[in-house]
Amino acid sequence: MRQRLAIPTLVIATVFALILAAAWPDKKMTSRDIGCADTAPARGKQICQALSESMEWTWMGHAIVSPDWRVTWDALHRIYCREKISAADLPVLESLKQGSDWRLQDGAVGLIRLVGGGASVPENSIFSPANPHYILKGGCVGYEITRLANPTLFMPADYTILEEDGGLF
C-alpha cells in the first residue's frame, strides 16, 4: 500500500517543484537594483536612484499575478516633484530609457511623458492634464519629501512623527 502512494506522491512533488522552479522570479526582479551604478551623468544617477528608491512592491502585472518591484504612477508623481524633473532633463531621461533594466526604462519613459505634457497625449491617457486621473493632478503640493532614517522610506513633509508612540499624524 505504501509503495502505491509513494510513486504518485513523488511524481506530484517533482512536477510541483518543476513548476515552482520555472515560475520563480529571477533574483534581479525581486530587488530594487535597476542598474544605477552603470548610468553615466550625475543627474542620471540621481534620477535613477530616485526611481529605484521609489519603486513599490506589487503583485499584479498586466492582468496576471506577477510579484515585483515596479515604478507606479504615484512613484512617478513623487519623483517628478521631488527631483524637479524638467525639459532640461530630457537628454538624461533619453539615456536612462536605454538602460539595462526594463523598470528603469519604464520609469524614464513615464517621466519623459510627464515632461512632454499633454501636447500629443490622448485625452484619456493618465499623462493628459484633461484626464481626471492625471498623474500630476494637484501639482506637487504635499510631495516635498522628508527622508527618514531608512533611505527607502519617504513621507510628505506635512507629516509629524510623535516621539511618544512613533505614530504618523
Image (cartoon, rainbow, N blue to C red):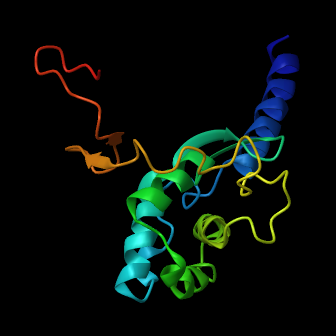
Count of numbered labels shown in the rendering: 0
Q: Which residue lies at the image location 73% right of the left edge and 64% below the top edge?
A: 118
* Residue furthest to the left: 164
User: Image height check: is 138 above or below 84?
Assistant: above
Image check: 22 left or right of 4? left
Q: Where residue 141 appears, x then y in whole percent?
A: 42, 45
- Horizontal side, residue 57 vs residue 123: left or right: left
Rendered residue at 59%/67% (across/down): 111
Q: Nearer the viewer, residue 148 or 130?
A: 130
- Quarter of the picture containing the N terminus is top right
- Find residue 102 and report its horizontal and vertical position in percent: 65, 68
* In the depicted structure, whether residue 45 falls above or below residue 78: below
| Residue at image coords 25%, 19% | 167
x 65%, y 64%: residue: 110
Viewer-proximal residue among 97 and 102: 97
Image quadrant containing the C terminus: top left
Above-or-below relation of 124 to 111: above
**Which one is in front, 97 or 146?**
146
Q: Where's residue 100, x and y in %?
A: 60, 78
Q: Position of residue 21 (x, y in %)?
A: 70, 48
